[in-house]
Image (cartoon, rainbow, N blue to C red):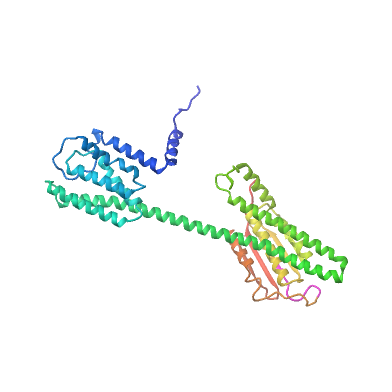
Amino acid sequence: MTYRQPSWGPSLVRAPLACWREAGASFQDGVLAVVLALLAFAPTLSNIGAQLGDLPERPAGVLSIVLTLAQTLPLTARRRSPAACLAVVAAAFAAHQALGFATTFGSVGLYVALYSAGAHQVRFRGSTAAAASAGYVALAFVLNRLGSPLGPADFSAFCLTLAAIWLVGSSVRVRRAQEAERRRLAAEVATAAERARIARELHDVVTHHVTAMVVQSDAAQFLITSAPERAGEGLVAVSDTGRRALRELRYLLGVLEATGENATGENATGENATGGNAAGEAAHAERAPTLGRATDLVEGARRSGQPVEFSEQGEQRPQPVDVELAAYRVVQEALTNAMKYAAGQPTRVSVHHGGERIEITVITDGADGADGSSQAAPVPHGPGPQGGRGLAGLRARVRMLDGQLDAGPRPEGGFEVRATIPTKPVQE
């Protein structure tokens, strides 16, 4: 026997709800007003409503119908013009009670209008509340003069009910304002964090490659007069460094463009980018600087005249892009500082791949070079790499990955950068 699922189900309920949410506020309020107006003429609901005065009941007529509609239909503008809506509905309710017409379900419109004024009235809130209070006092006086059996306690109790409804609307308005402020502050924090991230990326890319190009071009100028046959090698090194800088800048710009696309998969031009987005992310991931490309940094530093030793221990496993990029930036920033503040000094780069973390150590020796000369500039122990923007950005980057970065002078001389980054193996 084949079981057929019923045609009705949760999807039939979700579809109308989605359409209702997508409809504008004017449409929703209009539907509410019409429904209340129709229900106001249902005899079974006549006992449900706002009743004040208990005057002798007068037969229904055209005027009672008009006053009933005046208590419901103005709710169409309850969010656009809450004060005006409250004024019309309250006036109709007061006339309906003073004339002694029978209570209808349409009198609930007073509660809805009062709540809407508390929740949506932005300007002149105090004046609106004062005018409503004065109107209620006048209505109570009129009903008393018309012979209403209600006493001060009854009128006060009804007034407290109306005040409670206003306060409920006001609390909703305050909560909505607080949520909007929270979202605004969150957006500002996210914007500031994004700016800081972009600044760190630009610093890491531009500073390293520009420093290398300056060192390589200075060396080429020196070789033109002292060893012309080797000057070409320096110019080739400058060209290669420039190409690597352009490649990393293109990658960075690609990442920024990808983050600018909206969540629906449409780019700034409105075209659907769902398919292209995945391909773009894969292409960006392939061009992203990774720890496996740290040897390019070492070779570039060597071509700039910096003696660098590189060692790697452990099994290198694929890691998420943020982990790979952070490890790459640690090596990049450490070599940049070595070329800037200790040009010509021996530098040792060590990378250890552990089961739970990656440990990177970059040590630059002190004033004495490998050849025993003292021509190279010493590593500074005051201002310099310790207070630079690069190391501060690196600490923030590594800390975001629950890692740690320490940098500072060594007791025996020189400078050391040590980073520990937790690993998160990529699942196939």
Picture coordinates of residue 270 (x, y %)?
57, 44
Please tell me which residue is depicted at 66% across the width and 66% down the height of the picture. Answer: 418
Please tell me which residue is depicted at 74% across the width and 65% down the height of the picture. Answer: 212
Question: Would residue 164 be seen by someone viewing this image from the given angle?
Answer: yes
Q: Is residue 365 magenta?
A: yes
Q: Nearer the viewer, residue 411 or 272?
A: 272
Please tell me which residue is depicted at 46% across the width and 34% down the height of the picture. Answer: 11
Q: Is residue 20 magenta?
A: no
Which stretch did the figure color magenta?
Answer: 362-371
Picture coordinates of residue 62 (x, y %)?
21, 35
Answer above or below: position of 421 versus 99: below
Report the side of 284 relative to 92 (left or right). Answer: right
Report the side of 141 relative to 376 (left or right). Answer: left
Question: Would residue 320 be seen by someone viewing this image from the given angle?
Answer: no
Answer above or below: position of 219 versus 424: below
Answer above or below: position of 226 versus 319: below
Report the side of 399 relative to 26 (left or right). Answer: right
Picture coordinates of residue 186 (x, y %)?
49, 57
